[in-house]
Image (cartoon, grey):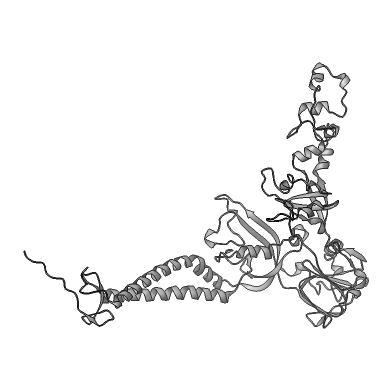
Amino acid sequence: MPKLKLPPQGGEKWLCIFTFLFMMFSVLCTVSVIYCIVIIYIPSVEELQTDFQGPKRCTTTLVERNITSLPGEGKCSWASCEEWCLSQGSSPCSKMYGILRDIGASVTYEKCDLEPEGGFVDHICTTLDDLQAVNCKRSKHEPEKPGNRELCIEYSAGDLISCEKGYCKNVSKIYDCTYKDTMKDLLNEEGKTDGFCNCNQCMESNTTIEGECPRQTEFCFAPNRRPETYDEKEQELCRNPTCQTCLDICKTTRQCLEMQSRRDVVYFGVDEYDEPQLTYYDCKDGKCTEIYDLKCNRTCDHKRFDFGLVNVVILQGERLVMSRCRTKFINGTVPIPDSSVVDNRWNILVSSCSNVTVDKSLNSIQADDCLNGTWIENMGVVDYNTITRKYLEYRHDPDRWIKNSPSDEKSLVPWEEHVVIYNNTKIKKNQQGCVNTLSMECMDFFTRFARDGANYTSRAVFNCYYNPEDPDYVVIDYQPERTLFFLMFWSLIPGIIMVVSCLYMCICSKLVFTGDDGHMRIICCGKAVTGIGNVAVYTPPSKSKA
């Protein structure tokens, strides 16, 4: 191949590279600006223009999870947090509601006895989320994915377990429950039969009963049957009667299962379609019966608390702090009396606080954001459920409030209803109720804040911000400085790149010349400049007239 008269110059290569890069960045920045209009510019401007005030305190009172909605129903017109703002309004969605209030009192307890011998207690109650689910489907000796089936077999009398797809928790460590038993329902079903389908009259199963009771079984095993009075048709009907025992019926419906059976363990916590379903069982020696309609009380690890040695009780979520303190102050200056001004037998101060700090070096306890200060009497040695039940009962009584005079209308440690701003409002992650990081922020959001007191646990209490002109919602994540930074960042960077790219393209359109040989050269002052000296402009030879 003959050598080119005008080979590509080094300057032409750089010219091609920079032209490509600037065109690419220009396109990318244009696309990013279009997306940023919806996910950054509009939300940021709205947030900066809204006069949010706070921080105040919010308490979650209701959580609605995984709401499904058909198009047009509007059930998912808003959500507390969604992972991608462009998908807002889609189903399913989750919502949170709560109470907005002012910050409670700050209480300082001084000269406290912080030794266990003096009655000091600082205990955190175990919750259902703290329990580790046990894989009851596999043995601990399995070479791959071992479980702990041996522990499940040891569930004994009085153990209530919750299971889902073969993974179980011993909830009797946390709750003391009354319930209804599916096996007892079969044995004691009301009606003309003795148990479901006369199962109490059946000595040995010879069939499987599913659904309604067969007429033959209902008639031939009736508790008041008199075979000597049967006519010919009735005798023929009962010649070879079929029945099933109550236990076998319970096993057939998968409501009576055994941990020792490898076939049964896969049915713990599944529905009729073998899909995961949270189910509760009462187990005795590994034999479990499905239960329902549970009514439970918290046990707090079955601990009992002695009120005879203390005069201060503080509840912080699942934490319980008890001590005897000589002096007590509101905001460090206002003294709290030693007992109720109505009845001096009420001399134990109980309150609910968001943050409690125990300083053993100073023998003091600092409690912040305290509400519902209540005087109670010495109840002796009681369990956790008695404490919370009595506290809930007494704190509504104005006579038991913390007062300096019986005529005072408000408590020094305020009653919650006296500091409420909005009694029922929507709780959102931010003003839009969505994030665009795709880093599971919403999962963390619901884990931290979606505790509404269900399962007899404490509610989540946290800082939040509100707009006095719009009581419809409050927001948790409000950081105007960060919002302004991202707004400026995503405005200036793409904007500068687009301006520089456009300027570069305009200059190229005036100075770059592409010859007939296909090579680019910069024409400046009538000369072609490629970065390696002056290069003559290529002029193709004229065509011959011949």
x, y percent for residue 128: 76, 59
Q: Nearer the viewer, residue 88 or 342?
A: 88
31 left or right of 399?
left
Instruction: From this view, report whether residue 127 is shown above or below residue 371.
Output: above
Which quadrant of the structure image shows residue 379? bottom right
Residue positioned 22% across, 74% down in the render:
6
Quadrant where the image shows the N terminus: bottom left
Residue positioned 80% across, 43% down in the render:
182
Instruction: From this view, report whether residue 160 is shown above or below residue 525.
Output: above
Residue positioned 51% across, 68% down in the render:
40
Q: Residue furthest top?
A: 232
x, y percent for residue 370: 77, 72
- Is residue 12 visible in the rendered structure shown here? yes
x, y percent for residue 473: 63, 64
Q: Nearer the viewer, residue 323 or 467?
A: 323
Instruction: From this view, report whether residue 141 is shown above or below residue 111.
Output: above
Q: Nearer the viewer, residue 116 or 483?
A: 116
- Is residue 291 visible in the rendered structure shown here? no
Which quadrant of the structure image shows residue 413? bottom right
x, y percent for residue 307: 90, 69
Which quadrant of the structure image shows residue 171? bottom right
Number of numbered markers: 0
Quadrant where the image shows the C terminus: bottom left
